[in-house]
Image: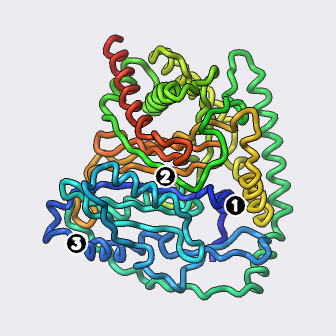
Amino acid sequence: MQRLTGLDATFLYLETPTNHMHVASTIILDPSEVPGGYSFSKVRDLVENRLPLLPPFRRRLVEVPFGLHHPVWIEDPGFDLDYHLRRAALPAPGGRRELEDFAAEVMSRPLDRTRPLWEMYVIEGLEHGYIACVTKMHHAAIDGVSGAELTVNLLDLTPEPVIVPPPDPPWQPDRMPTDVEMVGYAMNSLSRTPVRAVKAVRRTTAMALTLRRRNREPNVSPPPSLLSAPKTFLNAAITPHRRFAMTEVTLDEVKAVKEALGGTVNDVVLAICAGALRSWMADHGELPDQDLVGMVPISVRTSEEAGTMGNRVSSMLIQLSSLEDPVERLAAIRESTKDAKEQEKAISAQVLTDWTEFAAPAVAARAARLVSNLRVLDRLNNALFNVTISNVPGPNFPLYSAGARVLGIWPMGPINDGAGLNITVMSYMGAVNFGLLACREMAPDLDALAGYITEAKDELLKAAAAA
C-alpha cells in the first residue's frame, strides 16, 4: 500500500459531479508505414508489454473508512486491461471536428474509482487513414510532467517497438485490505501529524514574513492575488459537459517573436493566449475593463524526483494584459511573469504542500460539493482567476506507437467551478500544440477561440518582423 500525498488526494476531494479532475491527451498517428500493417491487437500487445513501466495503470484507490485519512493506492487484484483499453471509430468524414467532439465526450465522463483511474481509446476512421489515441488519467496520479513521462513510456523512437523484458520479480496484485486494517494504518499515520503540523506552522510563518518584507521593498510589484480577477462569462459554476478544440503554431514562429521582442517562449505563448482571449471576448461583447488573470501551473519537481509519479506542482497568477498593441501586451506579460517568478522563489514548495496533508478527507470532499451545489462562486463579485494556461515541453524528435508515427500531441487539462476554460500547450516536432477545453454551455464557439490563437500569433509575428 502507498498512501496518497495530501496534494494528490486534494484532486480527489475537489472532484464533484461537474468538476472532473482528470487530465488527458489526444494523439494523431499515421499507421501507413507500420511494419506488417496496423492492427488494434498490436496496440493492445504494446500496452500490455509496457505495463511494468506504467505503475499507475494497475493501481486502484482504497478509501479509509469514515474519511479518517487520505486514501491509499494498492496493486489492483481485479485488474482488467480490456476494461481500460477501448476501440472506437469516428463518423465520416473523420476530420478534426469529429475527433474534437469525441475527445470532449470522453472528458465529460468521470472515471470509475473502483478501478485504476485511466482509460485509453484507440480511434479509427480518421481521414487520410490516420488513427488517434485519447488517453485520460486522474490528476491524483499524475501532473503535467509525470504525465508526459508516462506517455513517453508508451512510445518508441523507431517504428519497431522495443520489447520490455518481464519484471523480476513479476508483478503481484495486492490483497484488498479490510476496514480494520485501513483504520489501523490511518491511525498510525495520524499519530505523527502533530509533529508535522508544528513544522508546517514554522515554515508558513517564516514564508509569510519573507513575503511581507519582499512586497514592501521599493520597485517590487506583487503579482495578482486570488479574487482580484474580473468576472467574465467563463467564471461561474460549470456543467459536466465539455467542448474541446485544438490548434497549433510553429515553434520557429514563437522563437522568432521571442528573439525580436524579448521574453521567453512561455511569455510568447501567454501573449498569444491573451491576444486570442481579447478578440474572442470582444466578439461576445464581454471584454472586461481590467486585465484577465491566468493561473499558470509550474513544476517544482526536483532532479531526484524525475521519473516518479504523483504531483509536484505549484502555481503562479499572471496578468494577461488586454492592451491593444501586441508588443506592449507581450512586454506587460513579460513583466508580470517576472514578478510572479520572483515571488515564487520566495515561497518554499514544501510550504505549499504542507497544509494539504492535514485536510480531513470527509470534510474536504463535502465542502467541495457544497460549494458546487450552492454555486458559491457565482455569488462572488470577482473571479478567483479567469483561465488556466499550462505549458508542458515535449520532444523535438519523432515518436512512434505500435509502429505508427506520431503526428501531433494535444493535451487537455481540467476545468473547475469559477474557471471554465483550460488552455494546455505542448511542443512536439517543431510545433506548439494548443489543447483548449471548456464547459460546453459557456463556450459553444470554442473553435473561434482556437482560430484567434492563429491570428494572435500572426499579429505578434508581424510586429516582430517590423522590429
Q: Answer with left or right where residue 206 lies relative to residue 328.
A: right
Compare marks 3 and 2 and give the one earlier in the sequence.
Answer: 3
Give the quarter of the image for residue 212: top right
Q: Position of residue 15 (x, y in %)?
A: 65, 59
Residue marked by disc 2? 145
What separation in Å lies between label 2 and label 1 (alpha carbons)? 22 Å
Q: Residue at x 80, y 40 (%)?
A: 206
Tag 3: amino acid: Ser
Q: Answer with left or right where residue 152 lies relative to residue 204.
A: left
The image's mark for residue 13 is: 1
Q: Residue at x 53, y 73 (%)?
A: 116
Tag 2: amino acid: Val
Compare marks 2 and 1 and give the one earlier in the sequence.
Answer: 1
Q: Is residue 364 above or below residue 380?
A: below
Q: Answer with left or right where residue 52 lies relative to residue 137.
A: left
For the residues carrying marks 3 and 2, which lies nearer the camera in this image? Answer: 3
Kindly state the secondary structure of the residue where label 1 is placed.
Answer: helix
For the residues carrying marks 2 and 1, which lies nearer the camera in this image? Answer: 1
Q: Is residue 57 above or below residue 28?
A: below
Q: Position of residue 371 (x, y in %)?
A: 75, 52
Residue marked by disc 3? 39
What separation in Å lies between label 3 and label 2 (alpha carbons)? 30 Å
Q: Position of residue 74 (x, y in %)?
A: 59, 78
- Callout 2–callout 1 Cβ contact below 8 Å: no
